[in-house]
Amino acid sequence: MTTRGGGLLSSPLLQFLAIGLVVYGFVSWQMPDAPQESASSADDRTIRVERDELLAYVQLRSGEADAVGLERRFDDLGAASQQAWIDRYVREEALVREARRLGLDRDDDLIRRRLVQQMEFIAVDASRTENAITEAEIAAYYDEHAEDFRESAYYTFDHVFFRAGFESETRAAVALERLAADSVPAEALPSLGDRFLYNRRYAERTEGEVISHFGMTFASGLAELEPSAKWLGPFESDHGHHLVLLAQVTPSAIPSLEQTAPEIRRELARRRQEAALDAGVAAILSSYVVEVAPPSPPSD
Amino acid sequence: MSDCSRVARISKAFGSSFLLCAMVVGGLLVLASTSASAGDEERQLLWGDTHLHTSYSFDAFLNGNRSADPDTAYRWAKGLPVIHPYHRARVQVDTPLDFLVVADHAEYLGVIRKLYYDVDEGPAAEFAAQVRGAIDSGQGAALFSGVLPSSEIEPGETRNPILETGQPNQLPIAGQDEPLREDAWAETTAAADRHNEPGRFTAMIGWEWSSLPNGANLHRVVMTSADGETARKFMPYGSQDSSYPDDLWAWFEKTTESSGAEFVAIPHNPNISKGYMFGATSLNEAPYTAESARTRARWEPVAEVTQYKGDSETHPDLSPDDPFADFETYPSYIQQNYQPYVASVGDYARSALRRGLEIEAAVGANPYKFGMIGATDSHSGMAAAEEDNFWGKMALDSTPETKPMFAAGRNVDGWNIGAQGLAGVWAEENTRESIFAAFRRREVYATTGPRMQVRFFGGWDFDAKDAEAADLASRGYAKGVSMGGDLAAKPAAKSGLAKMFGGGAAEAPSFLIHASRDPRGANLDRVQVVKGWLDADGKSHERVYDVAWAGDRAAGADGRVGAIGNTVDLETGEYTNDIGAAELAQVWSDPDFDATTRAFYYVRVLQIPTARHSLLDAIALQQEPSDAQPPTLQERVYTSPIWYTP
């Protein structure tokens, strides 16, 4: 068993040729002639297995880009395996002809969409070239998009809560004096204040979680504090007032190039696939002349 | 991190000195606790999905997920934008998870994906070409259906589903795919290590053991606290190794010894197990013994009771007196032929917890002593449990146009799928070890999606003030046990001093409960306690108590509180928080307590009604909502139980 996408396909020129080849094979197999609209004739009921068409079919179904290698390998197959390929080809050809006879290829929207999807997938698949992305490309991407990788700030703090509507700010201020006077450590957080909806202690929680539990005003206030051994406040939240003992802040930061490289590599590979798809579609489009019919005049 | 462990050490010191103090002067217990440290209160609530499939699962790949791999899954869980594998739009969750278990099927792990993308030569080449042909011509789902069992066993039958079936349907590559599986296991465990950030985000290694004899779903998610290097010492055990759970547990025993990895198994979808997940006997028809019951309880401390394929708390046929029992039922077995759905005792968590009490009374140990979580079982790589940000069970059924294609002919479609659930975990810190330990002690709970925060403690001397206290959680840990724990018989007063002060303990156990709404979500309707107990004949019973509720509704003569109302606008899908409460806190004492008999208690919290994803689809399509699903639902939490043993 081997893995595709290795050395053979690493050069952009070969990739392009390979895509072209596959696309050509697909187009010529999928749309051989004008639709056969004539009544049933002897020719319609005969399936001739031409070697070239069979090989093109095998190539398409096996996803093999190397046509020469494929032909050699096909000839090396045992008679039974060759016959199995022929049987599959014949079966599919017969069903496709019947479908065409019913006109399914012309007006069935699902088939149209399926054909488009398949074309796109072939173009993308042939460009699976993640290894070809260079360190320099990754570094350049990092320089340009560093901000996209920014990680949230993380906070570790305790708080004492005073529910809104019960003189919460005054009670908080009084409690703050008591906490300051007794220099109460966080580990011995007393049962001061009121029950809070969520937690009294937050360890390495993101800014987003702080916002969702306390609201925007409180989170903005927290962002301006420095870690301290002192209780600070009162700070207002969506729920009331709080005294805060802020133990640790990990500021929002951008991870290093080394940390983000695997992700950038995947992103670049994805872009390359998209570009390959665009190029493949453009190559097909360039062989067509597009004429847009003018709107027909109103009938009355 | 260092700060976290420092705090943990300090609290341990406090905890043990407190214990000593309580032993010496039991009567001063209440006084001591109110001035004690934060104790275990620092346990933080972490949210995660233990059951997420990627393109490495054979069924996911065959049903339209060709691109969302483990990396994609972790990126989604961390809140980063990703590309949906079917419709290719950019999708993102703005409520990231704290942990994720990528749990792809052990059977054919990564194999279809590798055949499709990578295999051109060798013995598998011909089947690889068939796979490509089937998938490229839109027949992937049909190939998948062909592997499903065709069942002859009706739900609720007592024939052994494993002995009655021949070889299960298999792909032609079965038995020759080991090199491909090994590659996939190496890749998926490496991805977990790459995304694991202790303190910030935990990527727990796991897989799914997918035993499905005769369409009886016996699936378990397996999860380990081990790192990738350790996990690569073994291959994930699948149903190709054995369809019997007993063999899975034996493998855990052996592999823990050989590799050092620790495991838990999490059964899921008992609702479609035809009565076999929580059977009266073990699956090979052996009656439970104390030893076999303990073995099961040891390896399976937690069950997944709500997920995309329906809710397994209970069923209206099993709990006819529970007006909220009819929730997200899923009437479709995983098999080729259609069989009408029957709800059996062995299919649901509540009836299984009751059966566990009965078995324990008979043999001396409880095989069904499990905590409860929710998970998604998403196959799209997206752990999406939100009604308004739901992306389909498979990748294929992620758009309104393709919903009818899901499980066609099996009595369900993509709109039957429930956009649920997640696991809430009370853990010291966000690490593999800490989360794993929380599962072991069952300090976990299930939500159908919304991140409602729920604390639940049982003890002998909670009083009403504890529910109002700023240090509610400290008091809970100091004076009782948390969810998942055991309540032993009421301790006798230990000293004259204690008696003098009133002895503290009441006759019945009391429960301290605090529930808060999802910080970004809808208000709460009510808090309920679900109790199961044994009578003098060893037969089990159940009852649901309304214990705290929003607004000024009065309980009726039967103790029940009427409906909260419904603010959902069916034209827009919007609700308002004009009804319901942001938080509910209560100390509840069991009015029907009998100290001589076994019982369990768990909490169910109901949210006010909100729009179901199928209603949001109907609004988007500008169609009338279908009658097949309710337009709105009351999302809910189930905590792990607390057991009372006399």
Image (spheres, coloured by chain):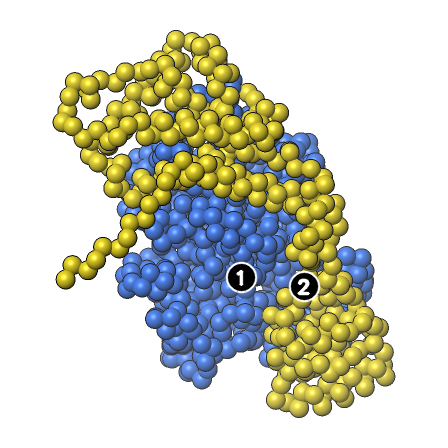
- The label on residue B639 is 1
Which chain appears blue? B
Q: Is residue B131 visible?
A: no
Instruction: Please name the residue shown 36% across and 14% down the image.
Output: A51
| Chain of the residue where label 2 is placed in the rendered structure | A
Above or below, B12 relative to B556? above
Which chain appears yellow? A
Q: Is residue B324 left or right of residue B56?
A: left
Q: Quadrant of the C terminus of chain A?
A: bottom left
Q: Which residue is mark 2?
A: A206
Q: Is residue B417 visible?
A: yes
Where does the image place residue B149, in percent across and percent down from the top left?
A: 36, 34
| Chain of the residue where label 1 is placed in the rendered structure | B
Where does the image place residue B230, in percent across and percent down from the top left?
A: 69, 36
Tell which of B260 and B70 is nearer to you: B70
Question: Circle 2 sits in a helix, a strand or a loop, which is it?
Answer: strand
